[in-house]
Image (spheres, rainbow, N blue to C red):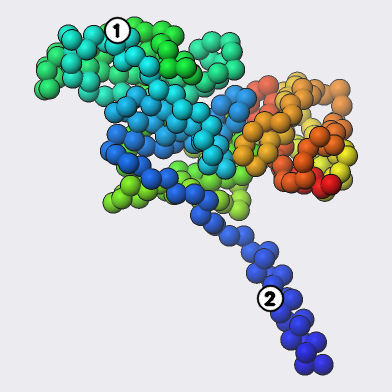
Amino acid sequence: MLKNKLLIGLLCWFAYSTCQAQITLDNTYSITNSYQDMQPVLLESAGTKYAIFDQGNLELKLYNLDHSIYKTITVNTPSDLYDPVAFPHFNAAYFYYVKEGLFDTDNEVEFMLHYQACLTSGCSTTVTAIAIINEDGSVLFQQDDTGIKGTSTYYLQHTNTPSSIINASDGTSKMILKNTVGPNIYVYNLPGTLMCDPCGGTTGARYTEANSGVVLKQNAPNPSTTYTVVGYELPEEADRGTLKIYNTSGIELKSYQVDKSFDHLQISTQDLPAGTYYYTIQTNIGQVQSKKMIVVK
């Protein structure tokens, strides 16, 4: 009898412990110099990435949500941006709008670069310009004596801001903390969802489940082996949407266009390996919801 009570007690404790949501450290990024920083960005097809930008070396590195390297973009020829003889002192560079399909129509990554070079070390005479950099490091566009008009939430700002929270494209939420006395940036997994994302301009999560109006139902069966059905309801002000499936690295695997003709979608999971996936729906006016599903074999 005593053994049975002890066993029941242990099982209850284990069930309680495992059901409690935890904030866990996902990864640590080491920033090697004062010209580097890390911020999340949302790519139209590839989803959320972590961007580490190096002003000093004109380099942008993108990491997947599992922290494997996705792409490295380095400006091939800085002389394409300014005359190093006339302005030998490169002063600063700022990265904006890391996107796919914004500055051209292919699936590659491009970004806007706002930079300044100086005639003297004191920068008494400068050239300030805007350039669009392609994924291969080439310059797609360049215009001298120009700058950013106003402010932009798509600015990968180099600051000492200690934290930010995002809703990632795979349905998870992340907390990003910066060590203010050291070189590290910490990424934490959060058990819940940010209901109103102040970083929506950068991450693309302007609307979340509390105020979106769109309904995304839990798939069934879940877990699934060969197929699953996802129910949804589009709000009155939206007439169509896109339902996407991501793996845990944030890579988009499937995409479907939906409208109000139906309220559910049957999805084949035969080609998906066993594992955890996230599915999201986004309406044509920007409303988003996301949920998790499991595939077994």
Q: Position of residue 201 (x, y in %)?
A: 50, 29
Amino acid on which disc 2 is placed: Trp
Which residue bears the numbered disc 2?
A: 13
Q: Between 36 and 158, which is closer to the camera in this rendering?
A: 36
93 left or right of 213 in image: left
Answer few, some or many: residues within 10 Å of disc 1's Cα (few below 14, many 20 plus, some between 14 and 19): some
Circle 1: element type: strand
Question: Decide: marks 1, 2 in contact (CB < 8 A)?
Answer: no
Visible residue check, residue 113: yes
Name the residue at 84% across, 47% down.
Answer: 297
In the figure, is residue 84 to the left or right of 43? Answer: left
Q: Position of residue 42 (x, y in %)?
A: 54, 30
161 above or below 202? below
Please state which amino acid type lies under the numbered disc 1: Asp
Quarter location, residue 84: top left
The residue that mark 1 highlights is: 144
